[in-house]
Image (cartoon, rainbow, N blue to C red):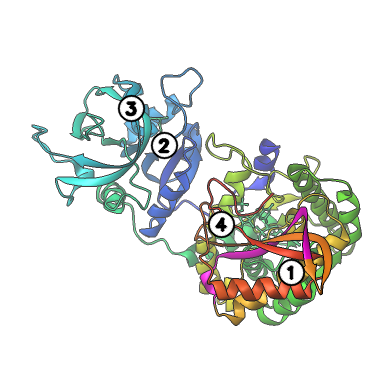
Amino acid sequence: MSEEYLKQSSQLGNLDRPQIAILDFGSQYSHLIARRVREMNVYCELYSCKVSRSELEAHSITGIILSGGPNSVYDEGSPHVDAGVWDLVKERSIPLFGICYGMQELAHVFGGRVAPGQEREYGKATVSQKGLNNDEECAIFKGLPEEFIMWMSHGDKLHEIPTGFKKMGSTKNADMVAIQNLETKMWGVQFHPEVTHSPEGPNILKNFVVGICNSPQNWVMTDYANEFIEQVRETVGPDGHVIGAVSGGVDSTVAAVLMNKAIGHRFHAVLVDNGCLRKDEATKVLKRLREDCGIDLHCHDAADLFLGKLKGITEPEQKRKIIGGTFIEVFQIEADKIIKDAGRCDFLLQGTLYPDVIESISYKGPSACIKTHHNVGGLPASMKLKLIEPLRELFKDEVRSLGMALGIDEPSVWRHPFPGPGLAIRVLGEVTDERVKILQEADDILIQELWNFNVYRDIAQAFAVLLPVKSVGVMGDGRTYENVCSIRCVTTTDFMTAEFYRMPYDLMETISNRIINEVRGINRVCYDISSKPPATVEWE
Ligand SMILES: Nc1ncnc2c1ncn2[C@@H]1O[C@H](COP(=O)(O)OP(=O)(O)OP(=O)(O)O)[C@@H](O)[C@H]1O
Ligand SMILES: O=c1[nH]c(=O)c2[nH+]cn([C@@H]3O[C@H](COP(=O)(O)O)[C@@H](O)[C@H]3O)c2[nH]1
Ligand SMILES: NC(=O)CC[C@H](N)C(=O)O
Ligand SMILES: [Mg+2]
């Protein structure tokens, strides 16, 4: 399925602007490298670690970063940079920076030796540049003190330095944690400059990206928008029509506004009521998008279809796949209507983000599948519409700044995310109309009280979960035996990691009292105090 997804999804979003290419070896932090580079206003893109020379050559590459990764370079079957790419790097003298596995790859290719260390090393370590007896300075450490703290996550290390390289730093545990080859313009570090726990990390990355690669620092979000608009016009052609999956969430709202700007009335926005939306959601979203965003949104009521297919299903991945498939079925019905009226409709617009992709499938690098997001891995192979996903390389906070730059109204930009499968993955166990209704009421009270206590914007996402567990209670001197509901509120910027929100007790009390008193079918409320990882934001 993942290959199918990649085939269907058209790559949009950049022309041939100068860029840093990040080759992804599957590290949990590859996306952070991309963020750090973009934070310097330098454009970059993530590629598979096995990207071909011809694919890279098609772009104007100012430098290459090799990410970390879960494998060991010396293992059979571990991923390696394509030989053609090494030729390209040599011929064009493209500067290259390897991080963790990336540095080990440099050692592996250029005659060094990588092997397991005696101890694995996770967490902070002091990197020292002292006593190296070098006659050259380390270009990526320019302006840094002789000793600095960096964050480590590795089990392997360099035992012999690759040919032509010099050692530029060490820690207590590892002798060679930084290497440099000025002649071939190659650097490697064992630590992770991209994580926030590495305070000097941004300086190191900037030394490479700007100091060494001379990448222009002129990339801004609105360029992304303009390029997208141009490319969409080209891809869709002068008479093409596009159907848009628009939920009212910030991602699809931003995507829809862009599409509206690109092709106007040839864009047909559809909200699918899958029977698992929040209380009064379809009505509210239609009103907001029409009145505040100028999108002519139309609602397709498919509640019976979705709930019918979900009958008896309790396994989370199965629910997600059914929902993904049914969404596409509905979009195909809507597309057929457009074809009847306008003659054609070849494309489907979705507001897919980068985290949806990395957590669903192994996208650019060999990372693990956590759960199938309905709009990525849940898509059926038989799908006829071609995907257009302008935000597929972006993170939530980047989409929000793009939304602000486009002048989209604040409530749309700052709305908490709501997953496409909706309450179906928050009613644990079988999804029934009755259980969805119970949860809608509890969820509505929660959100109202977050606004009343003026904390909605302090929280990244808040929702209620209906557990498949009953508990005994006492109400009005009588015994109750009803459902348990859990409240989940998290703080995060990119949804890749999250912490539970430290909710004030009086707010907890208000929410719990109101839910138990007002929602028939719930007699107990819990608060979820798990962080991501090891938990995830949603329960299923
Ligand atoms: N009920 C729906 N009707 C139409 N399209 C939907 C619906 N739910 C989700 N989608 C599509 O799936 C995509 C991914 O959903 P997702 O929830 O991640 O994004 P969003 O709803 O746009 O924003 P947010 O993450 O803020 O909720 C959406 O961008 C949209 O294209
Ligand atoms: O549109 C979506 N379709 C999905 O299938 C889906 N699954 C999770 N999410 C949202 O993604 C973010 C991270 O959630 P997890 O930690 O549970 O993976 C959170 O914001 C989740 O709400 C989804 N969004
Ligand atoms: N984080 C990494 O890139 C780890 C690389 C390699 N697997 C190691 O353990 O050293
Ligand atoms: Mg959503």
**Residue 14: percent from left, percent from top:** 51, 54
Q: Which sits earlier in the primary sequence, circle 1 or circle 4?
A: 1
Q: Residue at x 67, y 38 (%)?
A: 2
Magenta span: chief secondary structure: strand
Q: Which residue is mark 1?
A: 442
Disc 3 or disc 4, which is closer to the eye? 4
Q: Is mark 2 within 8 Å of ligand 3?
A: yes
Instruction: Tell me the quarter of the image containing the N terminus.
Output: top right
Q: Which residue is mark 2?
A: 68
Disc 1 or disc 2, which is closer to the eye? 1
Q: Which residue is mark 3?
A: 119
Circle 1: element type: helix
**Residue 418: percent from left, percent from top:** 67, 62
- Magenta extent: 455-473
Mark carried by residue 262: none
Spatial CA distance of label 1 from label 2 is 43 Å
**Residue pushed farthest top?**
76
Where is residue 93, by image quadrant?
Answer: top left
